[in-house]
Amino acid sequence: MTHVYFDHNATTPLDDKVLAAMLPYLREQYGNASSRHEFGTLARKAVNQAREQVAASVGVQPAQVIFTSGGTEANNAFIKGAAGMLGPSQVAVSAIEHPCVAKPAQELARTGWKVRKLAVGRDGRVDLAGVAQALKEPTGIVSVMLANNETGVIQDVAAVAEKARAARAWMHTDAVQALGKIDVDFNALNVHAMTLSAHKIYGPKGVGALVLDKRIELKPLISGGGHEQGLRSGTENVPGIVGFGAACELAMQRMHDLAPRLAEMRDQLERGLNGMGAMIFGANAPRIPNTSYFTFPGIEGETLVIELDKAGCAVASGAACSSTSTEPSATLLAMGIVPVLARGAVRFSLGKDNRAEQVEEFLNMLSATVARLRRLTAIAV
Ligand SMILES: Cc1ncc(COP(=O)(O)O)c(C=O)c1O
């Protein structure tokens, strides 16, 4: 079996159509979008078109889109930028945020902010009663992700936003893992800010966006020449931005066919997993259609991932975004999963080019690998 990729939550391959849209801006149309001459004007037009494409994918006006170097920067730009405008109070973020939300929030403690982790239940969903309780204290910033990168569990962001607005806090959602997999509507979610990233939707790495309600003002994370309405200085990454725009448009065109196809393959996988005695995290919560996160009690996730890779399948263990760490997943610990089980976690995330036969082959390979590891390892649970 050739190598089969089931790690689309880590990153996706660049779509051929996205690459084709980018190429002219990597070659002959190399102008600086701020230049007044023809080269610059062409680059500016391309950036503007991409801004419209990204805006349309989440139902906002183009002026609400601030291009960044990716999801990490957009999350930092919001948390730090909001804190730069508001006096210190409470910053409340879910206990399962990506580190690029969790860490900047944590850093605010040094400047007098009280950092509050919003608890999740065993199903991986944020506990709304807990949010209401937390927001009884004066709160400036709330951030709850739309879909979790590990479990794929979808949060009721609109319900959290309603509570945040009632408490007069600024509400942000990291929608990086949701875009292209479920409908993402900025206004319906009722948020003040949203983070997006291109490389999770078959676009290039190193480009993303912070989508903002125009009524809120942030202190820029990066200052300089005043690009992106003064919120993110630096010469625009024109090819990257063009690729992001094209990827958004393609994602919107294909989502309604793709999502049910991904869900069908995910269900096929999970029928097999259940038959083998796996435990599936967040299985009963609403989830994005491409993700399954599971463990075989007694088997280390890391070992399973390495063995599967040798056999020709790329999946992820624990928190793939920080796979250098051997700590059990913070998301699973927050869900009340004991560390010994959390250490067994394996994430399988499908993409548009996967097929049912590949899932079948994966299940066969997994079954053989699990049987072999069960004979070899004797980790007590
Ligand atoms: C939920 C979530 N937020 C943010 C990021 C970071 O995005 P980027 O890789 O564009 O910095 C990721 C991806 O790793 C993610 O999964």
Image (cartoon, rainbow, N blue to C red):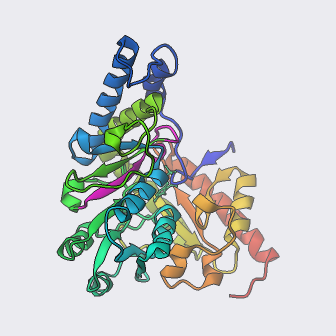
Residue 319 located left or right of residue 237: right
Vertical order, 33 against 11 (above or below): above
Nearer to the camera, 222 or 376: 222
Residue 193 shown in magenta? yes
Residue 360 visible: yes
Q: Residue at x 31, y 67 (%)?
A: 86
Considering the image in quadrants, where does the C terminus appear?
A: bottom right
Position of residue 261 measured from the top left corner of the image (x, y, whole percent): 39, 50
Vertical order, 270 against 14 (above or below): below
Residue 280 visible: no
Which segment is the magenta one? 191-206
Considering the image in quadrants, where does the N terminus appear?
A: top right
Q: Residue at x 55, y 70 (%)?
A: 294
Q: Residue at x 47, y 60 (%)?
A: 291
Q: Residue at x 43, y 57 (%)?
A: 75
Vertical order, 297 against 238 (above or below): below
Residue 143 located left or right of residue 277: left
Residue 368's quadrant in the figure?
bottom right
Position of residue 239 measured from the top left corner of the image (x, y, whole percent): 46, 28
Residue 204 shown in magenta? yes
Position of residue 67 measured from the top left corner of the image (x, y, whole percent): 38, 41
| Outermost right residue | 376
